[in-house]
Amino acid sequence: MSAPPEHGSSTPSSPSNTPSAGAVSARDLGRVERPPIDKQTFAIAAGVVVVFLLVGAVWPTQLKAGADAVLEVVVGDFGWAFVLGATGFVVLALVLAFSRFGRIRLGRDEDRPEHSRASWIAMMFSAGMGIGLMFYGVTEPVTHLMTVPQNDAGAGSQAAAREAMNYSLFHWGLHPWAIYAVVGLALAYSSYRKERVGGFSAAFAPLLRGRRGRGAARVIDIFAIFATLFGSAVSLGLGAAQMNGGLTEVFGVANSTTVKVLIIAVLTVCFVVSAISGIERGIKWLSNTNMVLALLLLFFLFVVGPTVFMLNLIPASAGNYLTALPQMATRTGAFGGTEWLSAWTLFYWAWWVSWTPFVGAFLAKISRGRTIREFVVGVMLVPTLVSLIWFSVLGGAAIDLQRKFVEGTGGADIAGIADQESQMFTFLQQFPWAGFTSILVVVLVAIFFISGADASSIVMGSLSSYGVDEPQKWLTALWGGLMGLVAIVLFFAGGLEALQDITIIAAAPFLVIMALMAVALVKDLANDPKMTQPKRRHGDRRDPRITAADTEWESPIPVAIAPTPPAPGAEPSR
């Protein structure tokens, strides 16, 4: 992600704002006809992915066995790192928001938000929705209801229902959005406050100086590509599985690996075409339409479902979640339950970590001009509230049906459906217009699939192009195709379980990178002029636009830029 064009300008009367030799500003990048490619980053990352695909295609059983062995080590020996890391990001985000750092603006001192608060919240709402909530909105609460996470309550009991809601909100509430908030904050601060060019790795500037630093930056971008690729492959797998479940329920299509692979192949072509065709407005329109359709589905289920129970569930779940949060946030499996943690909490934390390059960049781009306090509070609270309402409506209705089945008073055995991808549609069958709502869910998942994968492929193209906003189209298409192939190979190697296992393995090293990013961010903030310089008084003529620009950071982009032509009537430089 680059700084905005106007941030690349310098003030003649302010030598401190003059870029170092060889630096390329975001303004200069606008005159590059063909975005450059970081050939080493691209070659290494793409080469490793191709080798992975070949191994998975030729030896799928061995790939699954090897992944299981590595996963056992990661979960058994380093599961605590995921738990402490995720909780540490929550603590860090809150400290930054409510300490004196919260006054720092993500941009120059005179910058103000580009988007209204209502638009900003709406865009964050769109980021908070996706295939994951569609897939797990029903499945997770009823699964926890019948397989209690803490093993201290009877399956289907009232206590189990409370635990089910607690863990559903735990996995979709403050923790994932704190992870996104810290990364988005680091990227926004680096691009808009420090005015650095270079994309994801530029946020590590305080730790990356000199030639060794440039090599380390390349390693960071490579691991960011791996994290994004495998995290996105999980979303593709979940989306394909749920679409297959819907087609089976409505049209009787076979629920098989072959059908799922065909769905992935068709939709991969769709999102690759959208990514290279420049129809961003069309995708934006589809995404906004998807948000409206998701809200309509939510409202419909709220009306036809157990409305009073849902209304009671919202405040009760919020209170129970906050009360149980410290215990859930520090559960490591030291006293058992490692298998459950691996399947749920550790998978979720790894999944969120793998999505941080994409979601963090998105949050950064829409938040220029806001203060750190406003950014953190908005990013953590708004999506958490969305998750609270979503799970209280869909999960609450599913829990009500499942408990009635257990008590023998009607309902439906949703948790008893072996294929998780079909549980949403079994749930919808219990309400009016089941055929229509089932088709609606399939359409929602398809659009989330296309728009999310579209953005992910562009992010991977950017990561292998020195962080430019618009990488070359063939590069974006290639990464999109590789992402689809990874999802297909993992389906043949072990289905959704293989996708989840590989995500945890790929996210493990990236968790270390995120910890280093947090260190770099804190180091940057501690040296911010807002913290180190006396407060300005009325009449102070210092230019507020150069208060924090990093003049020592040199752009890694090796392109020859034509000098800016002099303004008409200006004296030529000597």
Image (tube, helix red, strand yellow):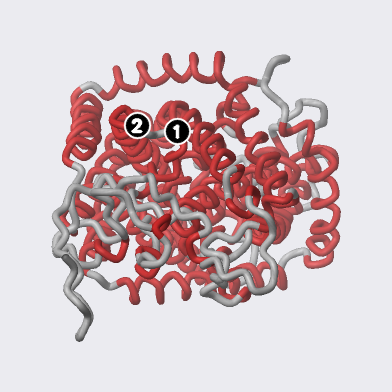
Residue 209 or 505: which is nearer the viewer? Answer: 209
- Circle 2: residue type: Gly
Sort mark 2 into few (<14), some (14-19) or many (20+) by Cα contacts within 10 Å.
Answer: some
Position above or below: 73 against 529: above
Position above or below: 92 against 395: above
Q: Would you say residue 129 is visible in this rendering?
A: no
In the image: residue 548, left or right of residue 479: right
Residue 193 or 78: which is nearer the viewer? Answer: 193
Q: Earlier in the sequence, mark 1 or mark 2?
A: 1
In the image: residue 152, left or right of residue 276: right
Query: Which quadrant would residue 387 be assigned to in this image?
Result: bottom right
Sort mark 1 into few (<14), some (14-19) or many (20+) by Cα contacts within 10 Å.
Answer: some
- Circle 1: residue type: Leu
The answer to the question of whether label 1 and label 2 lie on touching residues, with beta carbons closer than 8 A, is yes
Residue 477: x percent and y percent? Answer: 20, 54
In the picture, the quarter occupied by the C terminus is bottom left
Residue 492: x percent and y percent? Answer: 30, 33
Q: Judging from the image, what secondary structure is the residue with disc 2 in?
A: helix
Position above or below: 449 against 81: below
In the picture, the quarter occupied by the N terminus is bottom left
In the image: residue 103, left or right of residue 37: right
Residue 265: x percent and y percent? Answer: 25, 51
Which residue shows up at 59% across the image and 65% down it?
370
The number of callouts visible is 2
Which residue shows up at 85% across the image and 41% down it?
323
Q: Would you say residue 226 is visible in this rendering?
A: yes
Disc 2 target residue? 213
Disc 1 target residue? 207
Q: Judging from the image, what secondary structure is the residue with disc 1 in?
A: helix
Which residue shows up at 17% across the image and 62% down it?
32
Q: CA distance from mark 1 to mark 2?
A: 7 Å
